Image (cartoon, coloured by chain):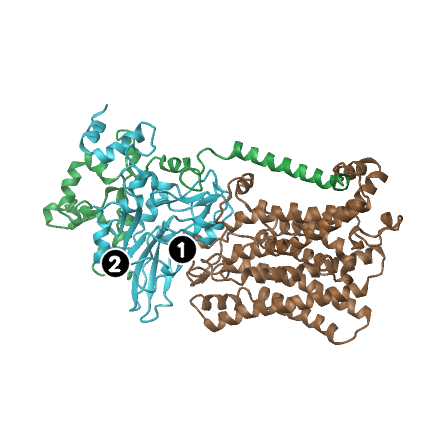
Chain colours: A brown, B cyan, C green
Amino acid sequence: MHIPVEGFMYPNEVELQWSVLIVLYPFITGLVAGAFILASLERVFRVQAVKPTYRLALLTALSFLLVAPLPLQLHLGHPERSLEMYLTPHRSSAMAMFGFVYLWYLMAVLLLEIWLDYRRDIVLKAQTSTGIFRNIYRALTLGSMNISERSLHIDERVGYFITLIGVPSAFLLHGYVGFIFGSVKANPWWSSPLMPIVFIFSAMVSGIAAVMLLYMISSHLRGKTIDIGCLDKIAQYLLYIFVIDFSLEMLDLLQRIYEADESFRSLDFMVHTRLWTSQVIIQILLGTVTPIALLGLTQMFRFNARVRKRMYAVAGCLTVIGIFAMRWNVVIGGQLFSKSFLGYTTYKMGFATREGLLTAIILVLLPFFILWVLVKLLPPWPDADSTAASGATPAHGTS
Amino acid sequence: MDPTRRRLLILLPAAAAAWKYVLAGTPEAAPGYKLSEHWWGMLIDIPKCIGCGSCSRACTEENDVPEGYYRTWIERYHVADWKIERPDVESPDGGKQGFPPSEDFGGKNFFVPKLCNHCADSPCTQVCPVGATFVTPDGVVLVDKAYCLGCRYCVQACPYGCRFINPKTNTAEKCSLCYHRITKGLTTACCEVCPTGARQLADLKNPKDPIHEYLKTHTVQVLKPHMATGSKVFYNGMDGSVR
Amino acid sequence: MFRDIEHLIRLAVVMAIVLIGFIVLRSAVVPRSFGQYGHYRGAAIAEVAARAPVFAGHEVCEACHAEVVEQKKVGRHVVIPCETCHAAQGRHADDPASVKPEKLDTAVLCARCHERNSAKPKSFPQVVSAEHSSGLACDTCHQPHRPKIEAQAELKRPEARR
């Protein structure tokens, strides 16, 4: 496969090391962290308005978190050796430590929080359902059928505590991914103390936008009215965090332009040529400025509910696309220029190959199938018929 | 024993000792090699390099390096007048077949051989998630290809671009300073074939090694000193334009 | 009280079992020599060192080819190791009778070092081969082991000088 090179690249640099799958990885973990932050807005920060999306946000986070290791496994030269990262983790390696952060977040935070929040529903379903589902629910109860007021209260307290440590854990989850890039001193496009912070804020933006869109789509599919107050609140938080995210990225850019160090000319040329479409057009103009403008307008002017919903939907879609473009520009962009600052290479993405576009598309769609299964198994809707019969509210509502 | 081999063993203790083990089918490090007695590096004398490409070709043959990847390579620099921040650099096929004639535009032209710098504070070994690449006690950065996951983090972390993924083994690979030769008293393949002596293996822990005197009497540099990698490949007469 | 936290205790037990299982797995699977010298498989050092050399090294060549050593001694090519031109001869040194080195094509070989190039040191002997030998192979006039052309009588192929 001939790869066109412009200028001079070190001979081993011509072929890109990290493909679109490595772009997907921070995108997916970002959605996880962002969705979780949205869920914690209600649980920890007591923003009641977003309660309708609480469970949906958690299930979304879980679906994406389960898919997150797949692009990594497909990328490895020896995926069968990947357990080595847990058996002999190299403590100085951000990648190795991240394996444990991921595991911690999955086991100790997300799964635990979902289990505790849903436990009452799981026990009821274990008692009322039939066939294979009965076995699944019974397994999920871990053998305990106790849903007394006291036990549910304990669940709620423990769950609160878990969400509390879950918030910094979510920051750690995605901040670490930022650090994996930001700590590479060899690469000036990546090396920056701002990286973990930019990654965290863009993760929150993408996760919140994704849950907002999923909420709108699922309500539409189920034929239920959208709680417009909830949507307004989500959009408001999305706007605030987006402004912070944009400011951070602009700060990085302005500093680079002003200081114009050794790498600047090379990077500047790269942005103006190879990354023009993905960075300037898609990430900045369409993916950041436009959604901020749309969301800003909804805060400044009083549009009617229908128009607001349309604006939120457009803003949400553009946001998610824009954050994907941001990951692309970081990962792929960081490999397009030579570390000699004298040349550029090209990314040749395959289609039906192990690390190709088709694989990437399948991996992006997979979490939605998992979410669909989870939603069937553990309905997240506040007006779910199965629990409405007993007239009870979700466990944590009693606090 | 046939006369040739007998002669070898009588005449050349050092090399013969190594060959004895090779021929016997047990080519492990010849006995008497102590890890703690050595600290390997290399000296490259830029004014002597003629860009013949012998080193890169020899390395490929010695180490079975796949086509299109380079454990060592040579770059040709053309620096126009005072523009040392914007040199013209090329490395056709890593310089393996030499370089095509280039017009002398009146600037400065020279060759720079490059390889793994076997950094004492190596950033590539720092980022390896499992410990598949490491600095040996005698100062050589090696890859354990039975343990490497092929995650490519080390390739990203190397500031010098000396690492690659071998498409046959799907593991990281790079110059090993011909570890299998230097532990047997031989020199590296690239140093062996260099016709002008531009490349020389150096044992920084050996007080008799000429490198010590050389470092005292010549102006030497390392590549990208601001990266503070503890590089042990020293370049004599390296121009400021070298990336 | 216990009944109300029973589910949490069951969960803790499950997690403990998984953790213990992991520790057991670890002691079984992690290679023995790991950590011997540092955070890596100590055995890897010997594995890398065990590779057989492909280049013999000029000392080994000189042990048998004493006449070439004599020839080179007086010329500029004395500093050039044998395998620079003759390529790796490890297998030949191992079994000289059966493994013969290939005949070299001087037109390609010599040009690598001696074809004029602006980046080569000015003091290094280099020619534009088209002008210098008008297409003739280098060994028509030069003996590679002693490249300097001393006199008519010492030329390798005197008929070429006609």
Q: Earlier in the sequence, mark 2 or mark 1?
A: 2
Q: Residues within 10 Å of mark 1 (few under 14, many from 20)?
A: many
Which quadrant does the N terminus of chain B fall into?
A: top left
Q: Chain of mark 2?
A: B
Which quadrant does the C terminus of chain B fall into?
A: bottom left
User: Mark 2 highlights which residue?
Assistant: B47
**Image spot of residue B70 (x, y percent):** 40, 49
Whether callout 2 and callout 1 share a subunit is answered: yes
Asked where in the image residue A229 lies, by quadrant, the reply is bottom right
Alpha carbon of mark 2 to alpha carbon of mark 1: how far?
21 Å
Amino acid type, residue under disc 2 in the picture: Pro
The residue positioned 31% from the left and 43% from the top of the image is B189
Asked where in the image residue A122 lies, by quadrant, the reply is top right
Q: Is residue A204 left or right of residue B208?
A: right
Name the residue nearer the viewer: A52 or A284: A52
Farthest front residue in view? C1
Name the residue nearer the viewer: A328 or C151: A328
**Image spot of residue A108 (x, y percent):** 65, 46
Amino acid type, residue under disc 1 in the picture: Tyr
Q: Is residue A251 left or right of residue C55?
A: right
Residue C1 in view here: yes
Name the residue nearer the viewer: A324 or A361: A324
**Image spot of residue A245 (x, y percent):** 61, 66
Q: Chain of mark 1?
A: B
Which numbered disc covers residue A351? none
| SS state under label 1 | loop
Instruction: Indicate which label's residue lies in the foreground, 2 or 1.
Output: 1
Which numbered disc covers residue B160? 1
